[in-house]
Amino acid sequence: RYIAQQVPGKSMLSLVGHSLGGLYCRAAITILHTKGYLKRVTPICFVTLATPHLGLSMARLPADTQGQFAHTHTGKELVVRDGKFVAPTLLQLSAAKPLSALQAFQCRVLYGNLDHDMVGWGSSLLC
């Protein structure tokens, strides 16, 4: 509502999110899509950088932080165990509405690192 009030009429929308911020952007466009806001604007670009779209593997985390991270709120939401989604956030974002919200954007770019990142390229690039 805030955005709609600040920019009356037809406007353009682009979003960029890094890491967990990319998941927040996906959640935000799902809400905007559900409420019909994406029909009142022109969705242009949706960009994420090293976002764990398919979760994080504990094996990719540095050994000295695995135990600490697994018990944090973020860790519980993003870690994939035994190749299965156990994270409610990831399950919700893989549903039909979030994916149709992504389709509304003219340009969808997912950047990921091939190496030396705790978010694997398969997860950050939706492979």
Image (cartoon, rainbow, N blue to C red):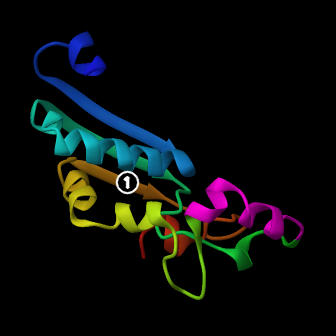
Instruction: Say which quarter of the image contains residue 103.
Output: bottom left
Q: How many marks?
A: 1
Q: Verify whether residue 65 appears in magenta.
A: yes
Q: Residue at x 48, y 70 (%)?
A: 54
Left or right for 94, reference 87: left
Looking at the figure, which quarter contains the C terminus? bottom left
Instruction: Say which quarter of the image contains residue 102.
Output: bottom left
Left or right for 38, reference 76: left
Question: Between residues 29 and 76, which one lies in front from this camera angle?
Answer: 76
Few, some or many residues within 10 Å of mark 1 (<14, 14–19, 20+):
few
Vertical placement of 114 versus 107: above or below? below
Image position, residue 91 (x, y; %): 40, 68
Q: Residue at x 71, y 57 (%)?
A: 72
Residue at label 1? 109
Image position, residue 50 (x, y; %): 56, 57
Left or right for 127, reference 81: left
Stretch of the chain drawn in magenta: 64-77
Vertical placement of 121 versus 23: above or below? below
- Dominant SS type (magenta): helix
Q: Amino acid at mark 1?
A: Val
Q: Residue at x 68, y 70 (%)?
A: 115
As helix, strand or loop, the secondary structure at mark 1 comes to strand
Q: Verify whether residue 127 appears in magenta.
A: no
Left or right for 44, reference 109: left
Image position, residue 80 (x, y; %): 57, 76
Q: Residue at x 50, y 64 (%)?
A: 124
Question: Between residues 81 and 51, which one lies in front from this camera angle?
Answer: 81
